[in-house]
Amino acid sequence: MHVCERDFGFDKVCYLQSMAYTSLQNKVAIVTGAGSGIGKATAERLALEGVAVIVADIQDETAKATAETITAQGGKAAPVHVDISSEEQVEAMVARAIELFGGLHILHNNAARLSGVGSGDKDVTRMESSVWDSFMAVNLRGPMLCCKHAIPRMLESGGGSIINMSSTAALSAQQTRLAYAVAKRGVNALTQHVATAYGKDGIRANSICPGPVQTEGFMAHVSPEYSAILRDNVLTPYVGEPSDIAALVAFLASSESRYINGQIISADGGMLIHYPTMAQLRAIGVED
């Protein structure tokens, strides 16, 4: 066991690299949406654990910046432009991973179109077909295409781990954000299908359902009033950070989670486990 200290753009962190993550050394990962937010934190965390990372994003400058941060700290990373709704671009992304790093062991399907103020994601009677289709193209078709083209390469590499980004919106309904929620629930079905079809071949697939996480995208797409309500309903003293989700992705990517397959895992600070009136009752001093 030894101490490794690096600054990967979030807080400066000391990690004790013990047996928990030795299984990630020399692995190859694709992280979509890795230019910012959870994807960026995940790419940096995986690189810290010895993974060579394809930093995939539709925004070229942010992908390049994440990759440069990783390589400046001695890690292995390469930026790749991808629109995950395009099968041609997804296929090229996977081929690039093989070309640069010689295999593929980890896929983190993180890229998504976010829902919130100004997104057009309304309730069913006000849903524009074009909005619905755009959410499905990125948030459901995209992960499917990434799995379609990554799995054969993972099989060639001896197996691997797919970590799909879902959402608590897939587990509990709201009055709006219909397209986002339906797409993310579809991601959970995709996860369980892949786990069922390829588990015996050494490929695991799991979904993470984050609650509120303080990313740039979250802050931009959610109103301050809505954000405050979410904070009130989290049971931890803090709202989650991208690094919290990145740590879970790293665990699910490693062999330490080898017996976890086909699971839908909430990482929401306990937001969905309590009565819906909890925050309001606490605010007026009613505790029992």
Image (cartoon, rainbow, N blue to C red):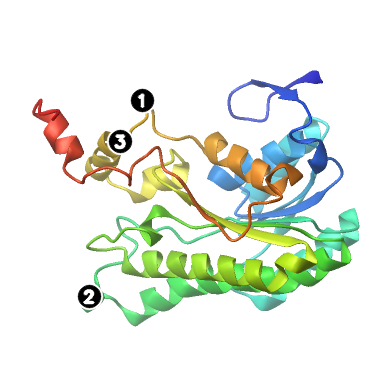
What is the quadrant of the N terminus in the image?
A: top right
Q: Amino acid at mark 1?
A: Pro
Residue 177 appears in the picture as rendered: yes
* Disc 3: which residue: 231
Q: Which numbered circle lies on residue 51?
A: none
Say above or below: 103 vs 257. below
Q: Are marks 1 and 3 in contact (CB under 8 Å)?
A: no
* Disc 1: which residue: 237
SS type, badge 2: helix
Residue 53 place in picture, x, y as percent: 76, 48
Distance of mark 1 from mark 3, alpha carbons? 9 Å
SS type, badge 3: helix
Residue 171 place in picture, x, y as percent: 37, 59
* Disc 2: which residue: 126
Q: Is residue 91 left or right of residue 143?
A: right
Q: Quadrant of residue 82?
A: bottom right
Distance of mark 3 from mark 2, alpha carbons? 28 Å
Q: Looking at this view, is 280 or 63 the one in front?
A: 280
What is the quadrant of the C terminus in the image?
A: top left
Residue 209 place in picture, x, y as percent: 47, 52
Q: Amino acid at mark 2?
A: Arg
Number of residues whose C-alpha sits closer than 10 Å to that of mark 3, classed few (under 14), some (14–19) or many (20 or more)? many
Residue 194 place in picture, x, y as percent: 64, 70
Say above or below: 266 vs 177. above
SS type, badge 1: loop
Number of residues whose C-alpha sits closer than 10 Å to that of mark 1, classed few (under 14), some (14–19) or many (20 or more)? few
Say above or below: 109 vs 86. above
Residue 36 appears in the picture as rendered: no
Q: Is residue 180 left or right of residue 124?
A: right
Q: Could you tell which of marks 2 and 1 lies nearer the N-terminus?
A: 2
Q: Could you tell which of marks 3 and 2 lies nearer the N-terminus?
A: 2
